[in-house]
Amino acid sequence: MNLTRRNFLQAGGATALLASVGCDKIPSALKSLLPPTSASADGPFRPPTSDEIDPVSHILNRVSFGARPGDYERVRALHADADQAAALFLERQLEPEKIDDAFAAYSVRRLETLVEPLGELFEYKEKVLLDELIRATLLRAINSERQLYEVMVHFWSDHFNIDPSKGDAKWLKVADDRDVIRKHALGKFSDLLSASAFSPAMLWYLDGRVNRRSKDSDKPNENYGRELLELHTLGVHGGYSQKDVMEAARCLTGWTVRATEQSRFDIGKVEFNPRQHDKGRKTLLGHEFPAWPDGLSADEQQQRGSDEVLTVLKLTAEHPATAQHIATKLCRRFIADEPPATAVAAVTQAFRKTDGDIRSALRALFSTPEFREARGGKFKRPFHFIVSALRATGAETDAGQPVVDFLLRMGHAPFHYPTPDGYPEEASPWMGSLLWRWNFAVALAEGRVGGTKIKADMLLKAFGSDAGLMAHLLGRKPTATETSAYHESGAGLALMLAAPSFQRC
Amino acid sequence: MAKLQTFVTGNGDERRTLVVVFLRGGADGLNLVAPLDDDGYYKARPRIGIARKDAVPLNGFFGLNPLMKDLEPAWKDGLLSIIHQAGSEDTTRSHFEAQDLMEHGGVVAGGWLGRFLRFRNGAPAGALSAVALGRELPECLRGAPSATVIQSLDEFSLGGNSTKLQRQLAGLYGLESGPLGGAARDTLSAIERIANLRAKPYLPSNGAEYARDEFSQGLRQIARLIKARVGLESASLDLNGWDSHLNQGAIMDPRIRNLAEGLASFTKDLGDAMATTSVVVMTEFGRRVVENSAFGTDHGRASVMFVLGGGVTGGKVFSKWGGLKEELLEGPGDLPVVHNYRNVLAPVLQRHGAGTDFSKIFPDFTVEPMAIYG
């Protein structure tokens, strides 16, 4: 049987997934959501043919959560030259708003908490909110055509990490994910920072809500002020002093959020209480905030409170160390655990020149030779590994508890990292996760992951041969050793997913 | 840089395992460890109090519930330490609130055990460093570098073709220089140990026999994993159903029996390995001192904690008993908390992770570790 690409996608890939997210029939309009067909629509997929990872495989590895069946061919067809094809794909990915993503939206349509307004979130059980948020995160990473956007959502979720198990963040993180992280993931850094600073979930998580000075003896709570400087903006070696931490905290006194324990109305509302604000003179990063004069009206006090926060956010967002810090983290994510200084410098410069435009920083990063050359050398974190395995096999999954359980075993379930620094990006903390990676690879190949199915025989047919399937999974031609191991193992697909090369991107 | 040869064992050569037993529902400490010399106790509990003649004598003043007689050998061997009037600062007396706060270790993100495993000194956690017996991850383990919820050892399998597959994995990873190659070797060795374990039926040592209830069977799985040396650093399991508002005996007695039998079998089975094992038993709150009209007790404050294992100052009840006079009680007549649960956990964590920075484990609390070790 000569299986066509279109048949595969309809029978084994996206369509089956549609059926899994809801029991209803697939709307005919959704058929257009399948990835656009290429000239080779009637033939089997054409996986990579070079011995080394080529530019197209490289960006699919690094800038997306991994290639699905057909992705390589689709991107490769964008231009005769592989570098140009990769560049065109990147350019498209940098404009996600122009990419139709109705299928990803369709896959999360039943997760109603995602679209609930802030106040309504309190009507739900915390467990429902967390489960839906985790499922949505997985489903979008797996299904979205806007892959770079989802990768950046993941990046900022770590950068502005909130573990929702603290206080009212249990309810509020859903709104933070939507209105802070997802809203600004490819926007201006200053907008992202300011949305995060006023996010009720963040005010809970880093104690901003109890940072107050109602009387002279009150000491400000420095938690948010410290992390703002150390993690969110300048970075630990960014040249600020302990005095700056204290002064930042003083500037932010009085900003609070209505808590479930106090109120039934407007829970989660962020407000400024001038009576709890430290009105004395302050100096932050060399900038002076004069003491408040007496006799300000209520409106004037509100205005002044806002101005003070906005100035703090502007000073930190625009600080040169912030550009360097963000650039370093981006290069660590996209290039190497030890990011090359020249690439960091190029990204820093782009970030500064564009007042913290995240797309411009990424564009600069992707055009560095260091990015282009760093192929296959990054260790996938467990989330990336799981999602890439599901994508590579065209799995249909409900992203339910069995998948999340694997992430918990590997210590990388979304929204489970307790401290504000977010999950580590480097390889070393994840080295202990091999047992569960292998377990997942075998379970997936054998169809033993609950709520998840693959059609291994159709997958093999779609690539025409074992060698073709291997090339798809590896992003290059398999070596002789890999080929022989694949056949000797008696479980070729599982072996390839568990192999060292598939742990890297 | 991490020492690679220790990935299997996670905690390196020490191979210490911490078992956390959570009694959900608010276990009545006064009915587990009774103040036999306190007249107030019998006044408050004329119908459900434990008579001195029935109790298992501890230090004269306190006595164990007779259904806990199985734990007498551990007490006499100096393996069991009892902390009375232990609990948290939470005054809501709500199961959910109190459990949540106690498992997180305060108004903090993540669980205290999860943070401990992530931030303790030493080699990084291995794949099997933290196991929870049951169906879902307990909140105390939240944020752990690895947390595995299992119901049985079968879940560790690598599938039907595992031998051939493992050989090929060993071949491919053998070509890897650097940390990944080392991690793979350690992982293969862990798989082998688990496979050996699964290959033969488990025979507990020293003539220990586990009861058939879920709690004892859970402890049996834990003992098995400890002996297999797969790097188990922490195991968690719950014993539920302590909410004894009415007919306290009917509700509590079977659970007390499960608890004592399970822990006694576990101690016997592990034998010498108890020297490197600690079991902590905790509950979200105790119960009202005065029995209610339905032969039960309502939600209260302090309860009791048990620490069982190597190195403890055994045979001792830590308490600052003030008596059960009404003016000494808290709120509607509850035993006040004298020993914050974190101060009980702290020395245990110190033993399992020397030099641990408590400001990371209990960031909103200044820990004063109790001297439960000699």
Image (cartoon, helix red, strand yellow):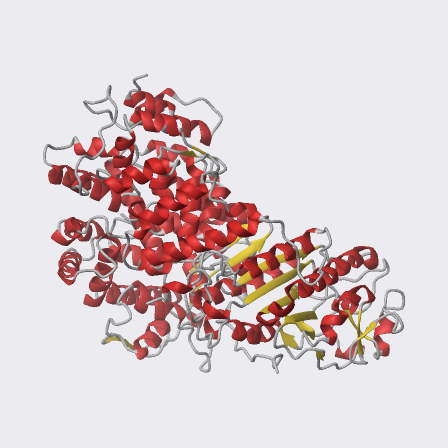
Task: Please report the residue visible at 30 percent of the width from the left and 55 percent of the height from the top.
Answer: A192
Q: In which quarter of the image is residue A271?
A: bottom left
Is A233 positioned to the left or the right of B359 in the image? left
Residue ID at (74%, 60%): B261
Could you tell me if residue A467 is visible in this image?
Answer: yes
The one nearer the camera, A35 or A303, is A35
Q: Which of the 4 image quadrants contains residue A290? A: bottom left
Name the side, left or right, on which B122 lies relative to B260.
left
Percent position of residue B306, x then y? 67, 70
Left or right placement of residue B305 versus residue A392 in this view: right
x and y percent of residue A216 in the render?
44, 82
Instruction: Count numbered badges in the picture.
Output: 0
Residue at image coords 68%, 57%: B239
Horizontal side of A485 relative to B263 (left or right) equals left
Q: Quadrant of the N terminus of chain A?
A: top left
Q: Is residue A185 above or below residue A286?
A: above
Outermost residue to the top: A1
Q: In which quarter of the image is residue A315?
A: bottom left
Residue A482: give x, y in percent of width and height: 28, 41
Residue A266 visible? The answer is no
Instruction: Please tell me which residue lies in front, B338 or B185.
Output: B185
Residue A440 place in picture, x, y as percent: 43, 43
Where is B142 relative to A14, above or below? Answer: below
